[in-house]
Amino acid sequence: MMSLPNAQNITREVLDNGIVVLVYENFAAESVVISGSLGAGSLYEEANKSGLAALTANGLMRGTHTRDFQTIATLLEDIGADLDVSAGVHRTGFGGKSLAEDLPLMIELLADVLRRPAFPSAPIERLRGETITGLQIRSQDTRYRARRAFHQHLYPQNHPYHYSVSGSLATVPGITIEEIQTFHAAHYGPESMVIGIVGAVNARDAIERVRAAFADWHNSDSAAARTLPNVEQPRDIRRAFVPLAGKTQSDIVIGSFGPSRYEPDYQAALLVNCVLGQFGMSGRIGEKVREELGLAYYAYSSLDGGMGPTPWRAIAGVNPANVQLAIGRIIDEIKRITDEPVSDEDLANVQSFFVGRLPLQLESNEGIAGTILNMELYDLGLDYLLSYRDRIYALSTEDLLQAARRYLNPNAYVLSISGPEMN
């Protein structure tokens, strides 16, 4: 069991300014991965400035007060390394990969872009143009439009999940560079930062590199943390239709709120979702709607988990003539999963799948880094993996049934459809 990342082989240190550093030594390859995040997501932007956190994060690599965009790109290219920053709802994440010998430069560059971005006008305007072009393209994508409509009808307007992290065509053009600078000053700081380093490095040396680059970083102007508004499960069926002329496919999203990663039944919900719409050829939904009846190009269910109540939803792409049939069969499967326990065979299959895939997730430095960061962010404890197998096999068919019944209701959900007009 010592081969799994755990409290004995993960070095964890909290710097004086609050930064949590996690290092896992792995000398199987001469590479190193840096991965982490800080509390600067779209949760902290106003609705009429949707996209501000994303523009800020994406703008960090466009130039600092000591290096312009071309200098940063050349430094990374010369050592064959990658480094990027992107925003989510709750946090802004960063990640990079290089040879282990180049870790000092990688940490130096990371500190420079996080702490001293210049947000130069011309590169930021190019970034804005790229963002707007992307939004224009997605505005004609039935899959994207169905997903956006689903979020807008599931979450109220005062909830950050109502909005796209990327922003919208109504908000992105009006965001100013001064607002980007203000957002950075208010929300980028060491207090909530977590950084993981995995690879062919000495743990103490890696921590000292981080300390040298970040220990003097302080942000006395950092804004207070925000919490999510409360939400309630749908009590009826809410429907949304986004017409897109000329399309030959309709996309469907059906669902409600799922558990956050902190909920005690999260793991049970994850397993029952696997039965519903993931395992094999996309679980029961895929088997019925796509394989048996041929109603969909793709059909599956998704449960994200996270820091808040992200959706538990079924998703399908269908011929417009099959929309109502596909919806009916998906609802049938949701009803079935909430009416009766999964079979002992189904439970055994998904338990074996979840336990069996864990070593595969830990085959790469990226996988290890993501795992230990989640252990930190979700307060799972550094020994979480040592008892993972036992926890999975401790779940019963009744546990899965109760999780399904808590979050899924075949008579109350949000349904969104995007595609050509339906007769």
Image (cartoon, grey):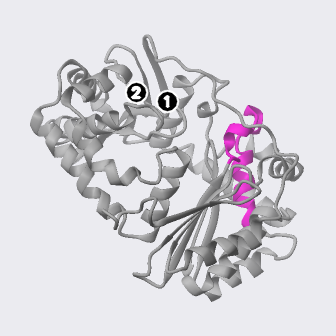
Residue at (82, 51) in percent of width and height: 180
Residue 303 falls left or right of residue 121: left
The single residue placed furthest to the top in the displayed view is 235
Q: Name the residue under label 1.
A: 150
Q: Is mark 1 on a helix, strand or loop?
A: helix
Report the quarter where the C terminus lies. top left
The answer to whether any part of residue 170 appears in the image is no
* Above or below: residue 64 compared with residue 148: below
Placement of 100 over or under 204, stated as above or below: below
Q: Residue at x 65, y 24 (%)?
A: 157
Image position, residue 268 (x, y; %): 31, 34
Q: Earlier in the sequence, mark 2 or mark 1?
A: 1
Q: Please give the range of residues in magenta.
A: 39-61
- Quadrant containing the N terminus is bottom left
Mark on residue 255?
2
Q: Are marks 2 and 1 in contact (CB under 8 Å)?
A: yes
Q: Is 51 contained in the magenta span? A: yes
